[in-house]
Amino acid sequence: MEETSGKTRWYDTLWAALIFFTRLPFWRVYQPPRASYKAVVEFWPLTGWLTGGAMAATLYFGSLVFPWTVTIILAIAIRLLITGALHEDGLADFLDGFGGGGDRARILAIMKDSHIGTYGVLGLIIYMLLLGAALFSMPPTMAALTALAADPFSKMVSSQLINMLPYARREEEAKNKTIYRKPTLAAGLSMSVQGLLPMALMIWQTGVEWTYVLVIPAIVLYFLYLLMHRRIQGYTGDCCGAACLLVELAVYLAVCSQGLMH
């Protein structure tokens, strides 16, 4: 099936997503057309199967060899290596920009600056502490299933920013010189399947209350949308990365809040 632009096919977009959202050498195997990168969000949740799966495998099998605390640190490190800390960089820039205050132009300028500020440093520390504490509160099987589900689900939910807001910069001002295109209806349905299948598996296997893990992350995204709409009247790539991590963290905290892991 070809893209709506008529220039790329679905497998071009899939390869582009794997190249864009990970640091694994997929580009050595195949080089998709440049136009494919405008639609990488359509396979963003599917890349979460890879990153979330690697984290889940490390949590489960690593717990058979190492102490639980060491396993958690290894699992987080594995994902950071696979993604190149792409979304963590976005979260730091997002926190620096919105935390630093100022008008729309000032926020966008701060987010584009490659230097990390106080808000970014503190935000990443708090995020990592909460993520680690959430994983530590779960047994290995629960933690692995949650990691497998939370990663693609958060990417599916966060991708809605592209439909909800316009891009806040001109294309030539974008960090990667690319503005994501709005997904078609068919792409949206595909993204829903990519994001919801692992979540359905987690809910089925653990018995966790589905309203917690589905509704709470959606509420987090809605408040992030309101903040972006009010402050910069749009989104950026950093905003998407920050939303992904914060929505994902909301999944972990929602699971923890139910006390089902003891």
Image (cartoon, rainbow, N blue to C red):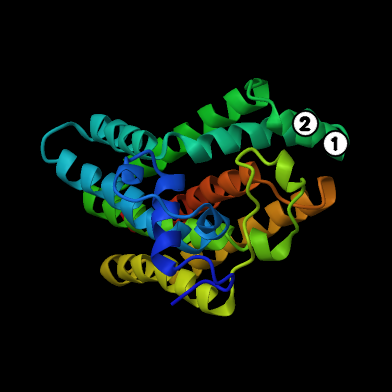
| Residues packed near mark 1 inside 10 Å, few (<14), some (14 to 19) or many (20 plus) | few
Is 213 in front, or is 189? 189
Q: In this view, which residue lies farthest toward the left?
A: 65
Q: Residue shown at 51%/62% (left/top)?
A: 156
Image-based side of 145 in relation to 216, left or right:
left
Image-based side of 95 in relation to 260, left or right:
right
Q: Residue shown at 54%/30% (left/top)?
A: 124
Q: Residue shown at 48%/74% (left/top)?
A: 2
Disc 1 marks which amino acid?
Answer: Ala
Residue 259 showing in the rendered view: no
Label 1: state its secondary structure. helix
Image-based side of 136 in relation to 213, left or right:
left
Residue 69 on image: x %, y %: 27, 31
Q: Residue shown at 45%/60% (left/top)?
A: 13
Query: Which label sits on residue 85?
Result: none
Image-based side of 158 in relation to 63, left or right:
right
Label 2: state its secondary structure. helix
| Residues packed near mark 2 inside 10 Å, few (<14), some (14 to 19) or many (20 plus) | few
Residue 90 on image: x %, y %: 58, 38
Q: Give the CA separation, mark 2 to mark 1.
A: 6 Å
Is 73 in front, or is 86? 86
Is 63 in front, or is 190? 190
CB atoms of marks 2 and 1 within 8 Å? yes
The residue indicated by pointer 2 is: 109
Residue 157 on image: x %, y %: 55, 62
The residue indicated by pointer 1 is: 105
Residue 239 on image: x %, y %: 65, 45
Q: Quadrant of residue 98?
A: top right
